Amino acid sequence: MNGPHDLGGQMGFGAVAPEVDEPIFHAEWEKRALGVTLAAGAMGHWTIDESRYARECLHPADYYASSYYEIWTKALERLLVRHGFVTEDELAAGRAHGAGATPKRVLRAADVPGALARGGPCDRAVAAAPRFSSGARVQTRTMHPQGHTRLPRYARGKVGVIEAVRGGFVFPDANAHGAGEAPQHLYTVVFSARELWGEAADATLSVSIDAWESYLEPADEP
Amino acid sequence: MTARVRALETVLAEKGLIDPAAVDAIVETYEHKVGPKNGARVVARAWTDPGFSEWLQNDATAAIASLGYTGRQGEHMQAVFNSADTHNLVVCTLCSCYPWSVLGLPPVWYKSPPYRSRAVIDPRGVLEEFGLKLPGETAIRVWDSTAELRYLVVPLRPPGTQGWAEEALAGLVTRDSMIGTGLALAPEAAP
């Protein structure tokens, strides 16, 4: 979706403000927000893609007014309600009122090191051969899906070059919506800044994205 | 947010959906165990061991795992090497994808709109805000982490460090130098 999260090339947010000796967390609640988000995700009822989509669906005014852990927390609340684990009333009261959905599993402290060390690999075998090879010119599709996509707006309808063929990966545009992993070949596609931003752009700058095969069409040689 | 997150955790714990001790263990991991020292060790090894450097270039996930760094948000690693001609910079314009297994949790600026919006259109301006002014002829390559590949920048080894041991070299490798918003420290700036 063309949501508030799709920030590449937007203007008006001001200077980057690196913080000297930045602490890992700025408040105790941030620690709990991180841990609760990961522990709830470990129940196994939604994917990372559905999580990202829930964050993207925050109202733009809310998204931009929220720190990243606030965005995580607000999206987690929505996921928990959507999947029947908690109710809005329970969240407002800070107390459980009754049973909800039954989790597939609950992450125990003893299992945390193993779970974090394993992570969640999302490379998958794809039977078909890759459609594109390294060096091929491609054009990204112009599309504006209502659902989740990982093709940023600034890189739609642009001509670039396949720099690397990365293998098969879970397709977020399907997986975020419960439509299965539907893996596709993934490519690193590099664009000149002039292709992305016009003739006035820095000639020494190039930008790459990682793009699933269905984001791409062959492009004619120049 | 303190009350809101406490309410959320309380409801989930009362319903048996999360184990607060597991939350503690997750926090402990990212507060004390996983951080940019991991990445610095990877870079220092690449500077001192050409075989490891080649492995890192060809199969970063396996090379990094050989040092014991694996897992969440580091499942599919790519190492990108700065050269005399090209400087690499990593961003995630769509969210905050970041190689946790080697750098830990991302800093606030990495997750915030100013960096995410400008890194792909005005990287030189962004780098100047980090105090880094690259020569005009140095090409900049920005990697937007739009999929599950996670990028680690391997900065140039600073001059004047011939013969340094891996551990001392690792002390020159800052977090920002592995994102691309900085360079490795000069020997005289060693901590």
Image (cartoon, coloured by chain):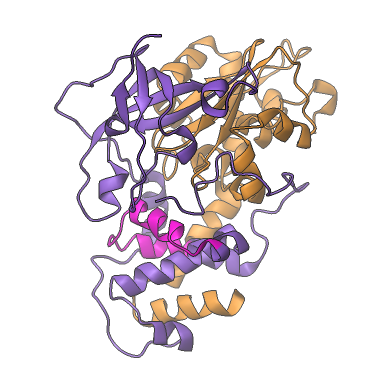
Task: Write the residue at 55% across / 66% down.
Answer: A62
Task: Write the residue at 50% across / 24% down.
Answer: B79
Q: In the rendered picture of this protein, how many numbered marks are placed on residues?
A: 0
Does residue A159 appear left or right of residue B134 in this picture?
A: left
Q: In x, y percent, where is residue A30?
A: 59, 64
Question: A86 and B32: which one is in front?
Answer: A86
Which lettered chain is shown in purple? Answer: A
Where on the picture, by quarter, is residue B39?
Answer: top right
Q: In x, y percent, where is residue B21?
A: 46, 69
Position above or below: A177 against B175: below
Q: Is residue A36 magenta?
A: yes
Question: B102 and A62: which one is in front?
Answer: A62
Q: In x, y percent, where is residue A202?
A: 65, 21
Where on the picture, by quarter, is residue B120?
Answer: top right
Q: Is residue B126 magenta?
A: no
Seen from this angle, which residue lies furthest left? A127
Seen from this angle, which residue lies furthest right? B188
Q: In x, y percent, where is residue A13?
A: 68, 49
Asked whether residue B23 is in view, the answer is no
Which colour represents chain B? orange
Question: B41 and A34: which one is in front?
Answer: A34
- What span is colored magenta in the figure? A35-60
Does residue A146 appear left or right of residue A200 in this picture?
A: left
Asked whether residue A26 is in view, the answer is yes
Where on the picture, by quarter, is residue A121?
Answer: top left
Dominant secondary structure of the residues highlighted in magenta in the image = helix
Task: Write the residue at 66% across / 30% down.
Answer: B123
Task: Quarter of the image for the C terminus of chain A: give it.
Answer: top left
Does residue B19 appear left or right of residue A32 in this picture?
A: left
